[in-house]
Image (tube, rainbow, N blue to C red):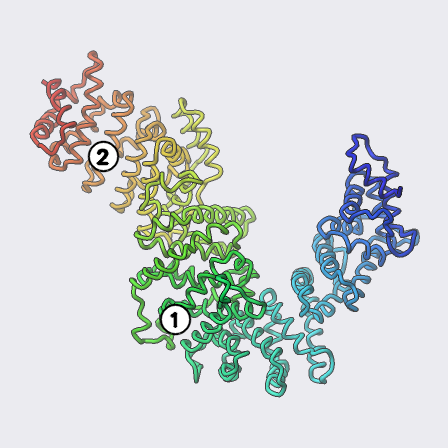
């Protein structure tokens, strides 16, 4: 039995004894010394998984075997054979070990060869071997080779052991093969890392490479150098925009492009050039240059089927519609719609959209162009009326296999744009439409679509003034109801929500937001899982915000804010319109609280969270378990507020209504909501601050929230009725004064707070018997505003609960109640009013009798 087979057998036996170092080393020697020639013969047919296991455990199990493995890998005489051996193994299992074995363990590590060869010398020999393999194209394991390079670049980024001279071969050798699908993805990552580490040298070398290709093109030599330049720039543009723009704007290159298009019948090159022009629109300078110098050629190419979709996209992305001579944006839209319908037509026996590679390319082009144009009112109206287009678009959006394609994001962008109500003039919605995303995948697919000026801008001279460009709110409602909801798009998105990219999730949120603007659609949105999508998105976004804060990253801080605000607003619409017990199945109502608090203004003063938490604990000694639960939640659910410049009074109002609705949840959920609002220092500080808000509606809504919180009285009671705590005394005195508010609805809320607390906690009722200002003000309001039925009934409950204390405790006396003329008169009047209600009328006589 070979040493390798013997070691594998012992691994599989899972022996408890330690396997000797010698057995590891014997197996390594057998595999990596290649004593039988240039390859490991593997007579026992050991699998790659077994070999990978030996390599991994040799590196991890013993220091001695790790050093032995390193010595074998650093043998300069066997580099080619070692690379042949390793590149057949799993990348994830062995490449880290291979690179770590090549890099020096620490500063000053001695030479690894008897001739004084160092680790760096060996690494350079490995890079030379990889260089030859990429250059000559005879190695089929290109993914392994590129992954090795990329990980070595990353691992060396902090140690900086390898100079740019050792990496520069990659610019030419990868560039010449950039059109190969297996090369392209990792080549872009390698270029990006080289640019980050060696920006000046990388830029210079890349420009030299492009200059060489230009000279070859001028001399008509080489392997289609212009196509290489076009493909290279197209791929690099999203990540190296400035460099690519400088190359593109060179007059020499521009002339070569036009010459090849005009004088050579090369459809493949022409399409590639159109793709470059499209992605070049990322840069405003290039976009303007294309509009000035290519518009005529682009318009002419609309006459050719193989070019018209690509040309239409470029004309749209130049955003210079006033320069169009023979076409308008309606024509451009029709070209893309027709192309999309053709590319997504189902076969007779297949109800699902099915596309080949070329169709996917055309779909991406059509979707990107229409994502721009769907910002324009006239195009919105037209697209909603194009039934075949909408049916295919929704089929694509619902197809689970579509979400892996780059066009999927644009599909939802179009649906989000089409579902916006014309009444929704909120600037945040427009900001969400025009917000720029910096992620590579999106920028590659859609250029800087989200950074463009809205086409609804009234200053846009190309905007149609015909009646067809006027949106009807009813039409948008019918579209949302009969297309988006009836197709159950939201259900499909819910089923795959966890798999969607963050950008696609954002567009899903925009669609939900648009639908929840109409109250009649809210219930169906919830049935299709919109609430769960909203909560999951907000949780993810909250984590991203905190990561930015923790990393002290301030750039693009508002990147997510607009969609987060839309999500929070959609959340309020759903909570206001629906019973919480019918909504929260997977999640607790508590999960919604931090996102509702985001919509409320924070107090100006600094909050001492620790002190407030200590006060809460002192005030609620009988509820330690609940306090601990809330304290743990505090650390997880602290809110990240929006800026005051984007939050409106309506946001404040609807957030408070939502919280009020949550506070009315069934007992356990209601208790949890109450604890989270009251025992979280930030949350309570916000609510406390709003009790005295200048806006009557906000103040009233806050008081109504407190009223509902009193249905779960223990935590909230300590905030107003603990007369040993200065803050509680202050809040109590404020509440007493608010009984006399001019707004009758606010008065009802305040009196309900007092009525609820004294009717549920007799101990508090007992302490209020002697509160002179409270009883005096309540009695006067009772008398003077006796005509208000709701106010009258709440004050009857309040006073009867106080009298009950006297009924049950004969030794207690309260002149404030017994000799209260205003109260007696108010009770007598109430007794004579039939709308007081039977259950309230029954408790009045005992009070009057006690007062005589």
Toward which corner of the image does residue 685 lie, by quadrant?
top left
Q: Is residue 180 left or right of residue 127?
A: left
| Residue 379, label in figure | 1
What residue would you read off at disc 2? 737
Q: Position of residue 156 (x, y in %)?
A: 73, 54
User: Which is in the foreground here, disc 1 or disc 2?
Assistant: 1
Give the camera-side residue of 383 and 159: 383
Horizontal relation, residue 168 to residue 293: left or right: right
Q: CA distance from mark 1 to mark 2?
A: 57 Å
* Residue 626 coordinates in the image, percent (x, y): 43, 28
Examine the rendered structure and indicate whether residue 196 appears above or below residue 641: below
Which secondary structure, mark 2? helix
**Dot 2, how many residues are within 10 Å of its Cα: few (below 14), some (14-19), or many (20+)?**
some
Helix, strand or loop under label 1: helix
The answer to whether residue 532 is left or right of residue 25 is: left
Q: Nearer the viewer, residue 90 or 228?
A: 90
Q: Position of residue 111 (x, y in %)?
A: 87, 50
User: Which of pointers 1 and 2 lies earlier in the amino acid sequence?
Assistant: 1
Label number found at residue 667:
none
Where, quadrant-wise, is the C terminus in this rendering? top left
Quadrant, the N terminus: top right
Q: Is residue 562 visible?
A: no
- Between 60 and 488, the one lying in front of the other is 488
């Amino acid at each position: 039995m070979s040493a390798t087979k013997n070691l594998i057998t012992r691994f599989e036996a899972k022996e408890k004894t330690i396997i000797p170092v010698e057995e590891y080393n014997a197996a390594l020697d057998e595999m990596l010394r290649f004593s039988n020639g240039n390859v490991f013969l593997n007579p026992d047919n050991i699998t790659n998984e077994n070999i990978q296991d030996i390599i991994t455990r040799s590196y991890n199990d013993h220091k001695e075997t790790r050093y032995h493995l390193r010595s074998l890998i650093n043998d300069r005489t066997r580099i080619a054979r070692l690379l042949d051996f390793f590149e057949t193994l799993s990348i994830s299992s062995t490449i880290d070990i291979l690179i770590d074995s090549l890099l020096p363990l620490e500063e000053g590590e001695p030479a690894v060869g008897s001739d004084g060869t160092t680790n760096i010398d060996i690494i350079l020999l490995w890079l030379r071997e990889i260089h030859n393999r990429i250059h000559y194209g005879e190695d089929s394991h290109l993914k392994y080779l590129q992954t090795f390079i990329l990980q070595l670049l990353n691992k060396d980024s902090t140690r900086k052991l390898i100079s740019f001279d050792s990496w520069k071969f990659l610019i030419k050798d990868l560039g010449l093969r950039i059109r190969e699908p297996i090369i392209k993805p990792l080549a872009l990552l390698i270029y990006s890392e080289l640019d980050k580490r060696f920006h000046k040298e990388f830029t210079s070398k890349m420009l030299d490479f492009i200059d060489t290709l230009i000279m070859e093109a001028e001399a008509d030599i080489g392997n289609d150098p212009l196509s290489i330049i076009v493909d290279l720039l197209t791929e690099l543009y999203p990540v190296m925009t400035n460099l690519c723009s400088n190359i593109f704007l060179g007059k020499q290159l521009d002339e070569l492009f036009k010459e090849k298009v005009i004088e050579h019948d090369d459809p493949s090159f022409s399409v590639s050039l159109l793709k470059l022009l499209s992605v070049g629109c990322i840069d405003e300078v290039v976009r303007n240059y294309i509009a000035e110098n290519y518009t005529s050629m682009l318009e002419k190419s609309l006459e050719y089927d193989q070019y018209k979709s690509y040309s239409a996209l470029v004309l749209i992305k130049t955003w210079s519609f006033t320069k169009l001579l023979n076409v308008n944006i309606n024509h451009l839209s029709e070209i893309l719609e027709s192309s999309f319908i053709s590319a997504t037509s189902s076969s007779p026996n297949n109800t699902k959209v099915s596309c080949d590679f070329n169709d996917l390319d055309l779909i991406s082009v059509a979707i990107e162009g229409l994502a721009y144009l769907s910002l324009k009112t006239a195009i919105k109206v037209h697209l909603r009326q194009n039934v075949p287009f909408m049916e295919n678009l929704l089929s694509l959006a619902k197809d689970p296999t579509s979400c892996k394609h780059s066009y999927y994001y644009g599909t939802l962008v179009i649906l989000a744009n089409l579902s916006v109500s014309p009444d929704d003039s909120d600037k945040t919605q427009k900001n969400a439409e025009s917000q720029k995303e910096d992620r590579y995948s999106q920028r590659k697919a859609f250029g800087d679509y989200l950074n463009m000026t809205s086409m609804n801008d009234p200053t846009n001279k190309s905007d149609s003034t015909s009646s067809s460009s006027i949106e009807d709110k009813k039409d948008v409602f019918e579209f949302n109801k009969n297309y988006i909801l009836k197709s159950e798009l939201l259900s499909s998105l819910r089923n795959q929500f966890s798999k969607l990219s963050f950008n696609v999730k954002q567009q899903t949120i925009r669609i939900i937001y648009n639908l929840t603007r109409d109250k009649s659609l809210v219930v169906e949105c919830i049935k299709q899982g919109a609430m769960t999508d909203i909560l999951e998105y907000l949780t993810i976004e909250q984590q991203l915000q905190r990561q930015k804060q923790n990393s002290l990253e301030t750039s693009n801080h508002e990147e997510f804010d607009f969609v987060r605000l839309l999500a929070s607003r959609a959340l309020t619409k759903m909570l206001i319109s629906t019973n919480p017990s019918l909504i929260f199945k997977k999640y607790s109502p508590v999960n919604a609280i931090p996102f509702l608090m985001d919509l409320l203004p924070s107090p100006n003063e600094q909050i001492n969270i620790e002190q407030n938490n200590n006060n809460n604990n002192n005030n609620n000694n009988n509820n330690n378990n609940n306090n601990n639960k809330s304290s743990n939640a505090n650390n997880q659910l602290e809110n990240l507020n929006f800026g005051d410049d984007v939050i409106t009074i309506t946001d404040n109002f609807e957030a408070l209504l939502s919280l009020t609705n949550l506070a009315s949840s069934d007992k356990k959920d209601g208790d949890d909501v109450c604890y989270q609002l009251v025992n979280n220092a930030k949350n309570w500080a916000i609510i406390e601050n709003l009790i005295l808000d200048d806006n009557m509606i906000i103040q009233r809504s806050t008081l109504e929230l407190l009223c509902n919180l009193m249905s779960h009285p223990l935590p909230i009671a300590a905030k107003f009725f603990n007369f040993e705590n200065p803050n509680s005394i202050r809040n109590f005195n404020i509440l007493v004064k608010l009984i006399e508010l001019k707004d009758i609805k606010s008065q009802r809320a305040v009196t309900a707070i007092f009525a609820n607390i004294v009717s549920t906690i007799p101990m508090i009722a007992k302490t209020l018997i002697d509160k002179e200002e409270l009883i005096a003000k309540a009695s006067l309001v009772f008398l003077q505003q006796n005509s208000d039925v709701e106010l009258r009934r709440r004050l009857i409950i309040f006073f009867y609960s106080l009298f009950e204390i006297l009924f049950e405790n004969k030794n207690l006396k309260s002149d404030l109640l017994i000799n209260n003329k205003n109260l007696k008169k108010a009770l007598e009047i109430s007794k004579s009013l039939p709308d007081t209600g039977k259950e309230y009328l029954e408790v009045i006589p005992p009070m009057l009798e006690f007062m005589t």
